[in-house]
Amino acid sequence: MIASLRGTVTVRRSDHVVLECGGVGYRLAVSAETLKQVPAAGSETFLHTHLVVRDDGMHLFGFASEEERELFHMLNGVQGVGPKVALAVLSGGSTRELLRAIGAGDAARFQAVPGIGKRTAERIIVELREKVAGEASAVPGGAVATAASDDPRTLARQGLVGLGFSAQEADELLDTAEGDTPEELIGQALRAAR
């Protein structure tokens, strides 16, 4: 795997850059946030990278920081979020701002990204909130302000709403559910919904 590249910027476009390293030009898809930190053509730069190999080819993604690459990996792990959509999310703000949005349950911020609907935005929040709590300490000054509750029932309710249930249906299903974690509560609620 290609973990990073240091080289001369030969092309700088709105969605990608080309770095020449040892006589080879590497095309890297980048977020708008990373592009802000890439210097003009002819200058040297360093980018963290991630290589995605698919049937249709190999795609190299570039990141200005290790934290941005880690958030890309987390987003890419959410069902319905591929590498291109994850890169679009990263273009919506700094890594610190996005971590705060996840921690605060700000699904509207993710719905504004092309390719992300309400369910996917809510799925991002539900699936990444706990992971983000640990990652926030790695980002300089990145304490996550959690405006939303970390109560398992609240998280389970958000998860059920993300799965397509109305808020009222979710509340009714959770009234009879028992469990200590959001996952257990959602499992109980889904069994009751059959």
Image: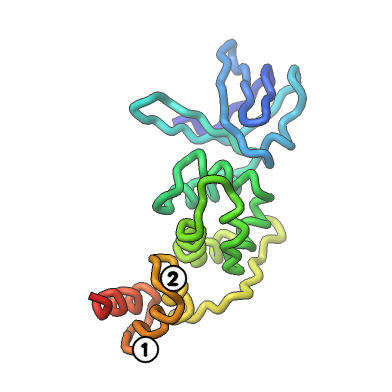
Q: Which mark is residue 156?
A: none
Residue visible at 68% across and 17% down in the picture: 10
Name the N-terminal-most of marks 2 and 1.
Answer: 2
Query: Which of the two residues, 20 or 158, is positioned nearer the viewer here?
Result: 158
Would you say 164 lies left or right of 22 here? left
The quadrant holding residue 39 is top right
Identify the residue position indicated by label 1 in the image.
175
**Between 15 and 60, the one nearer to me in the picture:** 15
Q: Could you say where residue 149 lies in the image, as x and y percent from the top left? A: 55, 79
Q: Which residue is mark 2?
A: 161
Percent of width and height locating residue 50:
50, 35
**Alpha carbon separation for disc pair 2 and 1:** 15 Å
Q: Farthest residue toward the top?
A: 23
Q: Residue at position x 60%, y 65% from top?
A: 106
Q: What amino acid type is highlighted by mark number 1?
A: Asp
How would you rate the neighbour count of disc 2 (Cα within 10 Å): few for under 14, some for 14-19, many for 20 or more? Answer: many
Q: Position of residue 56 (x, y in %)?
A: 37, 25
Dot 1 crowding, Cα within 10 Å, few <14, some 14–19, many 20+: few
Q: Amino acid at mark 2?
A: Val
- Tags 2 and 1 in contact by the CB under 8 Å rule? no
Left or right: 101 with respect to 77? right
Residue located 47% across and 28% down the image? 59
On the picture, is 96 further left or further right than 84?
Answer: right
Q: Residue at x 37, y 85 (%)?
A: 172
Q: Secondary structure at mark 2?
A: helix
Q: Secondary structure at mark 1?
A: helix
177, above or below 57, in the image: below
Q: Quadrant of the C terminus?
A: bottom left
